Image (cartoon, grey):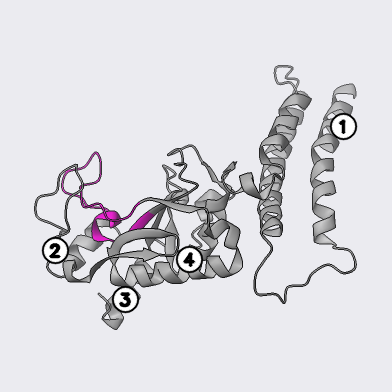
Amino acid sequence: MRLLSAFIVAFAIILAPVLWFALPRVFPGPGAGGPEGGAIDSGARIDIEMLSQQVEDLQIKVEELSNSLAEYAAGSQETAPPAAGDDAEVFQQSGPNGIIDAYAKVVLIANRRNVNDGLVVATPSFLEQTFGPPREDLNDQCQALTNPRLAPRLKTEDVGPIRVQMLAPAIESLRRVFENIRKTDADLYARINTAGSLCVRQIRGTVGRASTHSYGLAVDLNIDGVLDTLGDGKTQLGLTILADFFRTEGWVWGAAWSREDSMHFEVSRKQLDLWLADGSL
């Protein structure tokens, strides 16, 4: 019973900061701003994302406590309850922070496998069958796009806060994404940076297979020029916010892949089919 009581106390310690942080925002006091405004306050948006992350952390902790209780009930004495210091560290890592630092904060990606809400990628085989190869002699280095159908549609332009080289309809779509971000969250907009767009080369570890980057249909983004760590299941908080805007415009986020790549955003198969149908490509 003493061990069970300890679990209950530990759970209460975990839950209390979340409730203290969440309740004033879920039940705002008199005079709180309503949803009618065109732009959402940057601090409020960060609070929402941070709260979502805290809920994800809490779910993990609840699962850990449940597993520990089950082991205890089965007579196992090998698994000890999480130390209070571990819980404190979780909330230090994912708690609220100032606007100046919060967008670049590294967090776990909540519900990572489902972030694209049914949107899927245009596979390398589909792209090659539809357009042909981006160039005849693919290798491991970035080269020029020479495909006769696509090369005339390739543009290099300043789009929102970054400069990209992509196909014209992808640029126009990206422009809409950034304009919506600018109107909604100017602080985040000002901190968007890029790690590249067009790069015509074969996918690493393959021979002759070209990715959407090779077709001018993908872009890599980050916050403040800090590159995300590939495959660790984490990302910058600002990228989780950007993903919502990209999904609305029909782009896929690489965070959902088996090897997470949360800097990567690419035009979905669904959106590509629409451009093919209306003659944009």
Which is nearer the N-term, disc 3 or disc 2? 2
**Disc 4: which residue:** 178
Which is nearer the N-term, disc 2 or disc 1? 1
Please determine whether, in this image, residue 144 is positioned above or below residue 71.
below
Q: Residue at x 71, y 35 (%)?
A: 92
**Disc 1: which residue:** 9
**Secondary structure category for the residue under label 4:** helix
Q: Residue at x 71, y 58 (%)?
A: 44
Q: Amino acid at mark 4?
A: Phe
- How far separated are the C-alphas under marks 3 and 1? 56 Å
**Disc 3: which residue:** 275
Which is nearer the N-term, disc 3 or disc 1? 1
Quadrant in the picture for the N terminus: top right
Q: Amino acid at mark 3?
A: Trp
- Outermost top residue: 78
Residue 272 visible: no
Bounds of the magenta span? 196-219
